[in-house]
Amino acid sequence: MSVGNAPDVPEPCRELNAHWIAPTLPGMGNSSVRDRSDSYHVALARDMTALLSHLYPTSAFDTIYLSGGSYGTVQAQMLYGAPYELFPPGRKIAGCILLAGFSPFKYDKGYSKTLTWQNWFSVGPPSQIVPFHLLQRLVSTIIASKFKTLEAGKDWLRHFLFDKMDEDEKRAFAKYLERSGRSETDFVEQWARGSIRCAQNWDGFMEVSDVIHSDWGFNPATLDDEHAAKPILVVGSESDDLGGSTNAWLVANYRSAKFKAIPGGHISSVYYLDEIWREMIDRA
């Protein structure tokens, strides 16, 4: 739900002693509404530059890895392809992971044919045609009603995500929980609390479709050699009925992109993050 957290940093990142940064996106949770005088990709690059300058005043970091899931893949790609004069830390990017991602709809002309009906309704053509963000307001009202209390949020998440798991995914989920030393109750509660925090501010949610349809500042197919040489790992879940429908476009249009299929549904990449990150680090 676009509220940053880091409850379980993947083991390969811990082995590198990496600093895991998980920012909350603008207008989500307690994050301020962004300045609309700049385009989204410009504001994002400026904010992330400021954040890194705050954390590392002397730029004393060696490497940046980018990663995003679902809507977060949009921001990851914006930083991956950002001109270095706009995002100077981008020169230190070593690679990027996109989990169940979105393509830039400005260039992916056939995107609407691949979307699930939920995404077609929420970020597809209707979301750009109906005025005053009326569809987004309707969806936000429905979501908010599911997260009025922590218990209600946990019940809805179980129904929406976890009850759809087949037996194989349930076993993979159980093994992940055992490795991370967490219970299913803890896991679901963490997601529910993040969703409740996100529901405190709907400004960022209202512009999700607009951001995906906007100019991201570059065309993946025409990136210069220095940008395009950095590996991208596009990860898709085999039984994902919510996202990842534009994965094929991403692989076809980013010169150094590779696709990785994993079992399970929309959130199954969480169980395989150690494997995913090890592959990314080995490629970079």
Image (tube, helix red, strand yellow):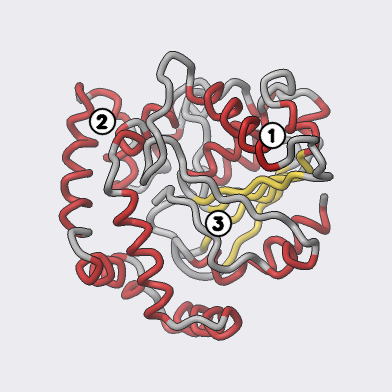
Give the mark, 2 or 3, whose residue is nearer the N terminus.
2
Asked if the residues shown at circle 1 and circle 3 are in contact, with their CB atoms under 8 angstroms apart, the answer is no
**Amino acid type, mark 3:** Gly
Q: Nearer the viewer, residue 175 or 44?
A: 44
- Name above or below for residue 74 compared with residue 142: above
**Which mark, residue 236?**
3
- Residue 238 shown left or right of residue 163 in the figure: right
Q: Could you say where residue 47 lies in the image, as x and y percent from the top left?
A: 57, 30
Q: Which residue is mark 2?
A: 126
Point out the residue furthest to the top here: 37
Characterize the local packing of mark 2: few (<14), some (14-19) or many (20 or more) Cα atoms within 10 angstroms.
few
**Which mark, residue 65?**
none
- Residue 199 shown left or right of residue 14 in the figure: left
Characterize the local packing of mark 1: few (<14), some (14-19) or many (20 or more) Cα atoms within 10 angstroms.
some
Examine the image and state in which quarter residue 78 appears: top right
Q: Could you say where residue 134 lies in the image, as x and y percent from the top left?
A: 17, 30
Secondary-structure class at tag 2: helix
Mark 2 to mark 3: distance in Å? 25 Å
Give the mark, 1 or 3, whose residue is nearer the N terminus.
1
Residue found at x 80% / y 44%: 61
Q: Which residue is mark 1?
A: 53
Residue found at x 54% / y 25%: 41
Secondary-structure class at tag 1: helix
Asked if the residues shown at circle 2 and circle 3 are in contact, with their CB atoms under 8 angstroms apart, the answer is no
Residue found at x 39% / y 38%: 113
Q: Could you say where residue 239 lies in the image, as x and y percent from the top left?
A: 45, 64
